[in-house]
Image: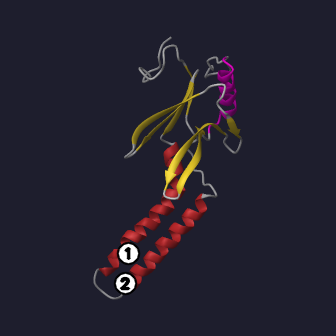
Amino acid sequence: MTVPAGWDGLLDPGEEILWQGAPDPGFHFRARNLALTAFGAAFAAFALFWMVMASRAGGGFWMFGLIHFSVGVSLILGSLFWGTFKRRRTFYSLSDRRAFIATNLPIVGRRLKSYPITPQTVLTLEERDLPSIFFAREVRRSKNGTQNVPVGFVRIPDAVEVYSLMRRIQAGMAKKVDPISEKP
């Protein structure tokens, strides 16, 4: 077996890459982002109003509102574009034993996480405009406590075929997918 370029030392002996892909890089706005966008807009609008009113008094005191205005604008831009930005820097791989999610984000850097695919792994196929497959859950901490977040291959065009391949991995019958015909 030949190991694909870049996978030296990452795969177990005899482990084979069966599929590789990436999420759809297009813009996608979720309804849950609407509240954060609205809050950011209100925050920025109030800061702008405050800066205009403070500038009438003369001097540079109005500049203290710039930080609040910047926060409001960053909330708007982050809620609109962060998901798209992150998806464009995310890559998926599936071996005959594990699912891999690789990201390359500014400041955070390159990360690779792997999740075993076993007969006990709960697989969920969410069929939407672009389907997603979830195969793990992670606990993420936030200032409001902890959240149990699903992990998987999100917004992939060939999700049905990958889901079928993952089911075959669970059953111990995984075969390499021919990338040209997309048939096992």
Q: Quadrant of residue 5?
A: top left
Q: Give whichever of 170, 80 is nearer the camera.
A: 170
Q: Is 32 placed left or right of 85 in the picture? A: right
Badge count: 2
Residue 10 versus residue 159: which sits nearer the camera? Answer: 10
Above-or-below relation of 1 to 161? above
Residue 105 at least partly seen: yes
From the image, give the main secondary structure of the stretch colored magenta.
helix
Residue 141 on image: x %, y %? 50, 51
Which stretch is magenta? 156-172
Mark nearer the N terminus (2 vs 1): 2
Compared across the picture, whether 52 is left or right of 20 comes to: left
Residue identifier under label 1: 65
Give the residue type at disc 2: Ala
Residue at the outermost front position:
145
Three-letter amino acid code at the position of disc 1: Gly
Which residue was labeled with disc 2? 54
Q: Residue furthest top?
A: 1
Vertical placement of 39 versus 84: above or below? below
Nearest the camera: 20 or 11? 11
Q: How busy is the neighbourhood of tag 1: few (under 14 within 10 Å), some, or many (20 plus)?
A: some
